[in-house]
Image (cartoon, coloured by chain):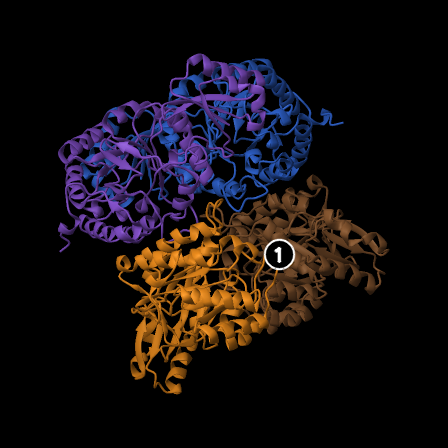
Chain colours: A blue, B brown, C orange, D purple
Amino acid sequence: MLIEFNRFAPEKDIDLVLGRLNDEGVLAFRTRSNMNPVIVSTLKVDGLKKLNIEGVASVQRVVEVSTPFKLASRAFKKTDTVVKVDNLEIGGDKIHVMAGPCAVESREQLLKTAHTVKACGATFLRGGAFKPRTSPYSFQGLNEDGLKFLAEARTLTGLKIVTEVMDTRSVQLVAKYADVLQIGARNMQNFDLLKEVGRVSKPVLLKRGANATIEEFLAAAEYVLAGGNEDVILCERGVRGVNEFTRYTLDIAAVPVLKKLTHLPVVVDPSHATGHWNYVEPMAMASLAAGADGLIIEVHPEPEKALCDGAQSLTPKNFTVLMLRLAGLQNSVCRDLAVPDMHLQQLDIS
Amino acid sequence: MLIEFNRFAPEKDIDLVLGRLNDEGVLAFRTRSNMNPVIVSTLKVDGLKKLNIEGVASVQRVVEVSTPFKLASRAFKKTDTVVKVDNLEIGGDKIHVMAGPCAVESREQLLKTAHTVKACGATFLRGGAFKPRTSPYSFQGLNEDGLKFLAEARTLTGLKIVTEVMDTRSVQLVAKYADVLQIGARNMQNFDLLKEVGRVSKPVLLKRGANATIEEFLAAAEYVLAGGNEDVILCERGVRGVNEFTRYTLDIAAVPVLKKLTHLPVVVDPSHATGHWNYVEPMAMASLAAGADGLIIEVHPEPEKALCDGAQSLTPKNFTVLMLRLAGLQNSVCRDLAVPDMHLQQLDIS
Amino acid sequence: MLIEFNRFAPEKDIDLVLGRLNDEGVLAFRTRSNMNPVIVSTLKVDGLKKLNIEGVASVQRVVEVSTPFKLASRAFKKTDTVVKVDNLEIGGDKIHVMAGPCAVESREQLLKTAHTVKACGATFLRGGAFKPRTSPYSFQGLNEDGLKFLAEARTLTGLKIVTEVMDTRSVQLVAKYADVLQIGARNMQNFDLLKEVGRVSKPVLLKRGANATIEEFLAAAEYVLAGGNEDVILCERGVRGVNEFTRYTLDIAAVPVLKKLTHLPVVVDPSHATGHWNYVEPMAMASLAAGADGLIIEVHPEPEKALCDGAQSLTPKNFTVLMLRLAGLQNSVCRDLAVPDMHLQQLDIS
Amino acid sequence: MLIEFNRFAPEKDIDLVLGRLNDEGVLAFRTRSNMNPVIVSTLKVDGLKKLNIEGVASVQRVVEVSTPFKLASRAFKKTDTVVKVDNLEIGGDKIHVMAGPCAVESREQLLKTAHTVKACGATFLRGGAFKPRTSPYSFQGLNEDGLKFLAEARTLTGLKIVTEVMDTRSVQLVAKYADVLQIGARNMQNFDLLKEVGRVSKPVLLKRGANATIEEFLAAAEYVLAGGNEDVILCERGVRGVNEFTRYTLDIAAVPVLKKLTHLPVVVDPSHATGHWNYVEPMAMASLAAGADGLIIEVHPEPEKALCDGAQSLTPKNFTVLMLRLAGLQNSVCRDLAVPDMHLQQLDIS
């Protein structure tokens, strides 16, 4: 059960209800939604009578939510959440394409890629400064230097920055430079990290674990929301199915399933899902056709020299072709690409 | 290694080569492709010299194919296979939509559905007369009666018939009525059945097993091709991944992966994959956006009364909406829907 | 609901009840269990009143079984089923080891293996005459010749024969030679084949599909039971999990899970599950420790020359070592190996 | 390639080799093994000549290891690693049973369980003070209070303490109280956490992720080893397979597979794997029969009141029965249970 108060609710009202829930011996957890205080409790609505809540004037509504994710559910919030990143809106009228290298490798590599993806219509620059690598002997990222290069790229291009944070101890640091904090698939159930990004005032892009059910995915998002951070962007990036020619099985059906269960925006990462650049375009097309709010795509100026995941990175030319094909989908999906200050038809793919 | 002869190759040439392969103690299997005799052998090309094949004039070419699927591979045949069903072409310029009920339940139900899907632009009628059911106590199909109703529906509507065959003993019977023989996902590795449909002159729609790798899928198709039947349509219908809100995980990436590995046409079944009618439309859109040659969709006049899989069946109205949305994709995918004798814009969805 | 009659129930009683169920419009399916006629119906027990069944004297009991498998359930039959193969009992006091080559390759290979496994204490000889192979170009088995060699091996050694049947058209032929008909994992949901072996009077060893849930597995067994054949032996042989160093993930927990849900005996195939001979012994040990009624093990006189699955076959020497280790488990699992006419301690592993 | 120096190698030798590797432009990473300095490099042995390493006297050996895990591999270290926890040895002659509640819920609950499991022969007490929970609204653990209760239980019983650490910021705190630091399945690829526990001088029990391949599992262990902590205990606890009646599929074959690939000890957690107390005993038996070095088992004085995972917890009585059954396996597996100061036959299960 969720008990939502109006935003001017006096603390004593909230304490009163918390106290009565404690008296009943049921769990009660205080958070907020859209500025309103909210109490999440394991009490069912039919136990409501005992709470004598009618007398508490600042209680706005009481909602029963049967799923383990509460604040994240459509049952609690009917309208789509639009995550604002400055003047950009994820989950709104426009489709956003986030693009960039897997890892920030050098200032030159990053700036070159940033200019390229900007010219093609991307609105966000992606790139890892902290890299989760299967082997301790693989390139682990440039750390704060990488973050600085990302910030410089933002200054030069106007692109917003989305980059991964892997450790609770780095959240403040990454938040200083990034516009959106990415939680990687391997950390989807790193609950301390989820709690920590729930406390900052930067949007979070949460990737689905390769093994995670939809319910686990939304329960992970709930950790961030329950911490008070309502700006969560969900990202489908493939699950382990029957894989041989692709790295993971991109679960595109997760897009409409999530759209039904939650109000949070949903983007898709076809690069990590497939692991091969030549399958990125068809899967990007498919994702938008299925209703995704955006894409996150790996682009590298020289994929064959990439320190990480070169096989799945698009060349600038291939990325240009992709953007043109995506533009061709706009009418079919009744939604435009967000390509500020430019016209896609000017792109040169010769 | 595949050794292809020209179509006028004398039997003695073929026997000669077979004999030499036998002398070398390597496996050799005779089949044909596009009317040409072909010998498939485990001999590698570098063992070719011993065969002294230059002297055999009717040998047209020798191709090394390293994958377990040989005739099905792009390495053997570069151009797309177009499967002809009378005047219709699967894998050609047009996208085909096959639609109909999961099971043929009665003459009335079938004919009603047939007229509906025809009116909306479908070119094939699907519907099972023999039903593979998990439980022996579930409805098992109308058998030959069902086939007769399907044939009658063809006569009345001009729709081509695609229906499942489950047992080697029924292949001739089903082939008498159907235009395309469907092999269900559970029978994808029923090798005797694959051999049997390899001997008939009707196209085969082969569904991917829920657990099958792409390589196993193509090796299953190879059984049909090796039997002499070159008209195989592949059908992706979902694999077991991390499923809770959908029945299977639709592996849409299989479409471009298959397109790269094989010349055979690829269609997608979003109904069985998702198990819920409300996810059929986004997954149908996504499949075409990813490059599928067609779709196979469940439609039932009264899904709530269906004897089988009602939850995943579209109502006639929902099917109409779907067809209109698919029509909107035509420009984006540079390919039209095959909707003979009608104009989609005339469809009424009020 | 299952309605069980006593074995002398007059036909008219059964017809009467079937008729009333039909009148109610519910599905009713006639079969038998332990010689008693049984009607399986979708009617729930609370609908029983309408049937007016008290007046039918030959009705012995009515059992509600909520699982999709009915006759196979513990709810219907509390006591363990013991499958008799002549004087041998699967699921009884003794643990049985079935052993032999993957495929019957030649008379010599088979007889040699048969003598070896007999000498080590196996009670059944396994070996495929019809082989389900992923590729049409792989060795497909010796067919009836293979069956004849198996029968000869039985005559010479006294071992019982378990061998696979793949096609409905071969059931009679295989039943003529074999003591136990094996249904392979790929055919677990070949429903026509299940129905066909349900009609013969030979025990059936049913392998779990690599993708099958326990419920699907038992529903497949139900097809055989519903056909009137009560002698079904279940065989766990691995599912697709997270596999790299083993072919499948052997789901040993399936043994106690099945033992709880069903009365049918359960054996395990560690050879196909692991795909590597050196993991066969620990997995065989683990299976018995978990409560399995028997094992089915691949043994080949010269694994490196095997036409099929050599990597997972034990040499005669390794099989001897395995049998000694299994013998060492007898006290721990409170059950002896069935090793007629011999003493395991005489085995020579020098 | 790994270059191992003797333990008295002067720093200049190591720097010299590192310098030459850097000159070649290949990655080089310094760590140690058994007190000896080791350089891990991506250089292959055939590139060794260029390094001119013969002149470096303190180089003890050069080993090519082709797997991504290097220090963890059998190729690098042939003999079994025995992890010492005071006077106890994991991976040595004796089998250890770690037991206790899922979560530390209260001082009383913990001490009661500690005395029980001690009396039955367990050598380690398990119990979470920090709990990774799918939902933010579930009980999250008693944190440092829980750690204090664990330490008190150790003082009272002599049991060693194994407990989970979830966050890099808590590593020092948990290390202050625990004897063994557990990394949970969800954190198996929390690389910063792995690095952090690689720096402490307490053994680490690393659980396999539910989705992790064996290679990923060992690469995760490599992070700890590369950090300089050689005392890693691997723990198999189930992967996602085809699950319905068990929570995960316990991959018991991982035990012999790991034993072949690595020198690290391997224990099994049948409680989390199955999720049901009645399958814990057969799976515990199977794990030891397959060669596991130990078990980690959930025991709760009153499972029905547990705040976490009650369904999979054994009662004290069931745990007693389990220990007796395990004792019965000792001869079969040629290894005794470590049950200091007691005789299992004195256990009372009346």
Residue A18 picture quarter: top left
x and y, in percent, of residue C41 in the image: 40, 72
Residue at image location 40% in from the left, 46% down from the top: D256
Q: Which residue is mark 1?
A: C135
x and y, in percent, of residue C259 in the image: 33, 61
Along the line of sight, which residue is nearer the eye, D57 or C278? D57
Looking at the image, how many numbered discs can be counted on the residues?
1
Is B205 drawn above or below residue B200 in the view shown?
Answer: above
Q: State the SS at label 1.
A: loop
x and y, in percent, of residue C301 in the image: 51, 60
Left or right: A94 as drawn, with respect to D256: right
Q: Chain of mark 1?
A: C
**Which amino acid does the dot numbered 1 rest on?**
Ser
Along the line of sight, which residue is nearer the eye, D152 or B145? D152
Residue at image location 68% in from the left, 28% down from the top: A320
x and y, in percent, of residue B9 in the image: 84, 60
Is A290 drawn above or below residue A308 in the view shown?
Answer: below
Is B183 drawn above or below residue A95 in the view shown?
Answer: below
